[in-house]
Image: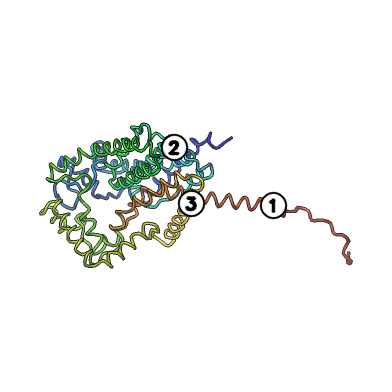
Amino acid sequence: MRFGRHIRCFSLVIFFVTLALRLLIAWRSGFFTTFQHDEMVRIALSLLKYHEYGNPFLVRTGPTAHEMPLYPLFLSLLYLIFGFGSLAEGVKIALACVLTALRCALMPGFCLDVGLGRNVAITAGVLASIYISALQTEVRGNWDGPWQALVILILTWMATRVWRDRSRFTRMPWQYSILWGFAILLQPAFLPILMVFLLAGLIVSPNGERRRYLKNCIAVLLTVVAFLLPWAIRNDLQFGKLIWTRSNFGLEFWVSNGPGRAFDMPTNLGFSVPHPSLDLHEAQLVCQLGEVRYNQAKLRETEAWVRTHPIQFTHLTVLRFLAWWVPPGRSVLHRVFSLGLSLLAFIGLGLMFRIQRLLAVLFSLTWASFPLVYYVIQWSSKYRYPMEWQLVISAGLAISSASEIAVRLFAQSQRTHPFRTHPDPPDRLPLDC
């Protein structure tokens, strides 16, 4: 039978293998019994304890726009239902693992639908089920990384269909526009992806259809604005400033660039760089100045340092760029695997331009636009996580192509020099017989 008839069964296997592996790792790592309160968790707890969307840091600092609202609101609902103890922690971890498993299970169907073929679907599904690039992001459930990865997978899938069926020239599907609004309310760093997708569509549109396409683009952007508007109005009422996304760029830019800074988050936050989530003095300073003024002060300080230390800033930016594409890893084995995955992903992307140009263009636009802001702030594996599945698919294409070439070469060698199970009889017997 053709593999397409069994895609649901294969995806189901991938789902349960991925889920079981993540839950096992979470259990063995002690995540079910050791609680870790990061910014999103603190905001969720603040909503229940103080009825205030705020307090993401070490002490109570008041209202916040440090994080986008969707995931903290979801976490607060979870804590409301299951309490603040082990049960809620277990549910949070299980939901994160389920979302990860769902994303891995969708990847084989995605590969088949976009025309990458059966072998790539199998390879990508298996590779996705065993590859874990950011353990705590993927498993612990304190961050919205699994949500982001799933959303950008679905959006890329929908984008390929919008381009294929040319509905971008007639009427853009309302589901596509709404999902973009949801995605950017979840993660503002997705906005550059949307912009380059729309711009690429404009560039390749025939002259006679550009006006209609522009109308559809405006409809998508207005939908995004509609999703962000309630959040922006709330921020204007709380802070006297129309903040459309987050208020935290000044803080993150300051933590990442300055005297004694490293390119990566574990080094910066683990040693000398104070952060209000970990440092009492900085948290009290946020409380004293207010979140907006605090971030503005940190931004001005860092901009001054960048102007006076351009070489150091460039050096850190280059290191962050290299870390994004070749992650440092937790061990030598992890670093080797990450390097291999990145190399295979770029090879696979090159091959993709030959067999599925549309998907290769969408992947390339994502890789070019999504990491831009992360080149100027400290590197963390959780930042690359939402687009990691694209690297896995591209690497799967490279592995699949290499295996097909190897099989063809082996078959050709068999036809040229077949194995002989019985040697030819000698022309004459040996003399000593």
Relative horizontal placement of residue 120, taking residue 38 as reference (left or right): right
Residue 322 position (above or below residue 55): below
Residue 319 on image: x %, y %: 34, 63
Q: Which colour scheme is used?
A: rainbow
Q: Which is closer to the viewer, label 1 or label 2?
A: 2
Disc 2 crowd rating (10 Å Cα; few below 14, some 14-19, many 20+) is few
Helix, strand or loop for disc 1: helix
- Reading the image, the residue beneath label 2 is 164
Look at label 2 and name its amino acid.
Arg
Marker disc for residue 414: 1
Residue located 38% across and 48% down the image: 365
Real-space Cα separation, disc 1 to disc 3, in angstroms: 28 Å
Give residue 2's position: percent from left, percent from top. 57, 36
Residue 221 visible at all: yes
Visible residue check, residue 27: no
The type of residue carrying mark 3 is: Gly
Foreground residue among 49 and 273: 273
Q: Are marks 3 and 2 in contact (CB under 8 Å)?
A: no
Q: Which mark is residue 348?
A: 3
Q: Are marks 1 and 3 in contact (CB under 8 Å)?
A: no
For the C terminus, the image quarter is bottom right
> Which residue shows up at 68% across the image and 54% down it?
413
Q: Which amino acid does label 1 sit on?
A: Gln
Front in this rendered view, residue 310 or 205: 205
Q: Which residue lies furthest to the front in this view?
A: 208
Q: In this view, does 114 lie above or below 397?
A: above
